[in-house]
Amino acid sequence: MTERRSSAALLSVLFFGIALLYLPILVLIGYSFNASPLVNVWGGFSTTWYGQLLHNRQLLRAALLSLEVAVTASSGAVVLGTLAATALVRFARFPGRLLLTGMVNAPLVMPEIITGITQLLLFVSMMQLLSWPHRGFTTIVLSHVTFCTAYVTITVQARLAAADRSLEEAAMDLGAGPARAFVEITLPIIAPAILAGWLLSFTLSLDDLVISSFVAGPGASTLPMVIYSKVKLGVSPDINALASLIVCAVGVCIIGAGYLMTRSDRRRALQAQLAAR
Amino acid sequence: MKPTGRPGRWLIILPPLIFLLVFFLIPFAFAFKISFAETAARVPPFTDVISFTREHHLQLTLTLGNYRYLLTDQVYGVAYLYSLRTAFFSTLICLALGYPMAYAIARSSQSAQGLLLLIIMLPFWTSFLLRVYALEGIIRDTGFLNTALLYLGLISHPLRIMRTSLAVYLGIIYSYLPFMVLPLFATLEKLDPTLLEAAADLGSTPRRAFLDITLPLSLPGVIAGSMLVFIPAVGEFVIPSLLGGPNTLMIGRVLWDEFFGNHDWPVASAVAIAFLLLLAGPIAIYQYYNVRQLEA
């Protein structure tokens, strides 16, 4: 749509919506610097709660497990997602294409609670039949890879569909095999999308509560599971501090991913302009 | 359809296909099977549906008891209806709020568009659990909203929002609004402005042009956005659990309690399967529009 002035009413709804989205997070960050342990009393500025986080063994252990899961799961998802995106964009027809399309899109809308229950039942049945996998790190990673793959596929698919195939064809004309042409020409083009997919998977995995709660089994607790059980008991000031830290870290990741995507867009546009001269 | 003489492509297709088959699709088969089992005091806590007799005959032991239980125990019916109603009205409110937002973004300049989209995207990726928790800081009795209203003298007693249906509605709208705005923006952005100019040239008022052109053309976005809000909202667990009270019995919470509270896995499986059947229609609609948009 071309640039046109929006009415005041339209803009006020937009800003109301944005305020609605941001106000709770800003208030939360504000509270995290409250010296008073009472949530409704302002006791002056303090970073006590941030300091206390470092001494909370339970939280630190859970955070470590969550980070390990997130790194492993997003790395696995990036491989599977890129393969799925390549298959869906490059191969117009193959047996199982519709099935793959459905399985890539369904996790995006499937209520987590259903995915969680069904995956737990799978793992329990697999354990009976194959004595593998033990519930814990492995099962959490496997279930996270499943939904992260869907997000990576969507991200990479869009970029791959927009990529210029003639470069790859030129490389093949010059004698490169299809695999080599893909790795040397197409992979660099879609690399920002792959990286963005990794970052998105990382944040999604770090955030997951429902699916992890089902498949984790006794013993393994991820960070959201610990946060949930603490929050369920009531508001605690150290969770405010932790939440602020996580929100800021995720914000940086997402802005970074967005920046990578747009920067490479701009660079490609520039290159195209130069080439056209 | 034969893979046209290139076996190499199966190295690309098979890993994701097999992984998703095993860890996404086949689990539903297990849930379906176990929904016909009975609870048992053992690990895992249910009876075998498929077993072998001593003579090595395959034996199926099915019980429909779990499904009968769903129909007779009122809790499930009430929870399904409450979830559907809550998700439906939350979706409508998200649409009413999200449409003007997406429209305003689509009409702003290219550079403002990028920034506004990033602003909408950011909460979309920010921890869901923590955002729900942050909302609690606003709406609880001693929270930001009540403190501000009391300070301004607009109310004399704190408003009771936590542990009510209103809190659940606010939670869903707050959490899912970006899911509505983004697909709406995607369709509104593609809208050809010359169509609106043509309508204006032919004497149509802006309101008429909106109803006749913009709204019908943005319908795919309306449907995609609505499904992205409605489907997860029906199964929502975190929001009713943290913000809702004893009356906000959504199906996600019932399922959770059945599993972790009562340890009744077969009934939980039956609830999940019944729930999935209920959502099959909306999910199919979403998939249909999604695939059509990708092919376009």
Image (cartoon, rainbow, N blue to C red):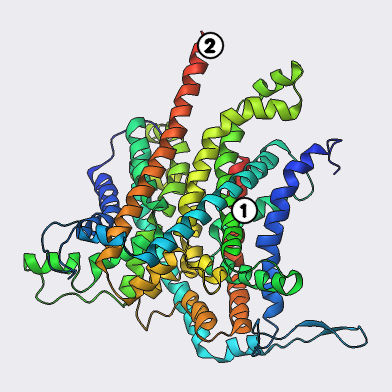
- Looking at the rendered structure, the kind of residue marked 2 is Ala
Image quadrant holding the N terminus of chain B, namely top right
Task: Say whether residue A36 is left or right of residue A224.
Answer: left
Circle number at residue A276: 2
Task: Give the Cα distance between marks 2 and 1.
Answer: 39 Å
- Judging from the image, mark 1 belongs to the subunit labelled B
Residue B193 screen position, x and y as percent: 42, 33
| Above or below, A186 relative to A139 | above
Identify the residue position indicated by label 1 in the image. Answer: B288
- Judging from the image, mark 2 belongs to the subunit labelled A
| Above or below, A248 relative to B249 | above
Q: Which residue is rendered at x = 71% and y = 27% of the image?
A: A180
- The answer to whether residue B209 of the structure is visible from this angle is no
Q: Secondary structure at mark 1?
A: helix
Q: Nearer the viewer, residue A113 or B164?
A: A113
Image quadrant holding the C terminus of chain B, namely top right
- Badge 2 crowding class, 10 Å Cα cut-off, few under 14, some 14 to 19, many 20 or more, is few
Residue B67 screen position, x and y as percent: 64, 85
